[in-house]
Amino acid sequence: MHLVLFAELDWAPVFLWGLIGSGGALVVLALAFFYRAMTANREESKSFEDGQTVYMGSLVFGIALIIGGLYFKTSGFAGSGNSATMSSFTEFVSKEGKFKASFPGTPKEQSQSALGIKFKMYMVEEADGVFGVAYFDLPAGTNPQGAQVDSILTNARKGMLQNMGATLVKEDRITLQGKYPGHEVKADVPSKGGEMYCSIYLVNSRAYLVMILGKQDWLNSDKARKFLNSFALR
């Protein structure tokens, strides 16, 4: 009975609430920084000026995630619930997004623009889980470096897990194509009886999220690994 009920779960909202949670954490972090900067004395002002770029990036990053998550959560998207086979995978190429990935069928595409930020997400939902890729661009001139990048990625992960009620199992610093920084996250999602794998990357001023959520056996399947391993820039 447990397996039947699990198969009927709609995983799309879990993915979307993860985006909203990530955004919320970053916005709170950035607003706290700017509040402290406004009340700082002259001696403290210099240190706040040095950190302005990363916190501005965090603020925009967070707002974009919230807008995107809320939009897709209310869009009524739901998958067919059918389970794909390996033969159903085809390579999907996004010329605008400058990436490619293998999905089990044609992914549902959604987009939203706000505050000059264009957010796009591609998703395929099955009975036992969901495959998703999302991306957006930070405003021109926002290009975090070094420790600033790690701070943004870490806070995105914290907000995402907290909002999903998920428990971090493992987190590693990774690179995309041996060059671009990212965090690879594995987490338990007790409320859904499943798990999540998510890779978050910053490619210059563009952010990518590559995520799968679902039942443990589904996450460890050949098709889940095929999807994760297929993501690449182009």
Image (cartoon, rainbow, N blue to C red):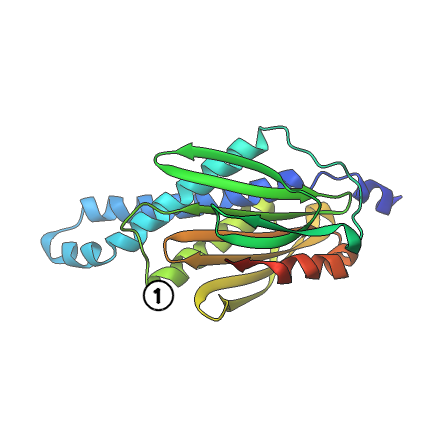
Taking 185 as reference, is 58 above or below it?
above
> In the rendered view of the protein, which quadrant contains the N terminus?
top right
> Which of 41 and 52 lies nearest the eye of the viewer?
52
Q: Please give the name of the residue rendered at 69% of the width and 60% of the height, measured from the top-left corner.
A: 226
Residue type for callout 1: Ala
Residue nearest the viewer, comparing 174 with 148: 174
**Residue drawn at 79 percent across, 54 percent down:** 87
Q: Please, what secondary structure does the residue beneath circle 1 have?
A: helix
Percent position of residue 205, x then y: 37, 53
In this rendering, the count of numbered labels is 1
Outermost residue toward the bottom? Answer: 178
Q: Given the current orientation, which residue lies at the most extreme left position?
A: 42
Q: Depth check: 138 or 43 in front?
A: 138
Counting from the top left corner in percent of width and height, residue 177 is at: 50, 67
- From this view, report whether residue 98 is shown above or below residue 176: above
Sort mark 1 into few (<14), some (14-19) or many (20+) by Cα contacts within 10 Å: few
Residue 135, image x, y percentages: 48, 47
The residue depicted at 32 percent of the width and 43 percent of the height is 31
Q: Along the horizontal axis of the image, is 42 left or right of 219?
A: left
Please indicate, yes or no, whether residue 28 appears anywhere in the rendered image: no
Residue shown at 56% from the left, 51% from the top: 161
Q: Is residue 136 left or right of residue 40?
A: right
Horizontal and vertical percent position of residue 69: 52, 38
Q: Is residue 160 left or right of residue 48?
A: right
Residue 127 placement: quadrant: top right
Q: Nearer the viewer, residue 172 or 124?
A: 124
* In the depicted structure, whether residue 124 falls above or below residue 198: above
Residue 71 visible in image: yes
Label 1 sits on residue: 147
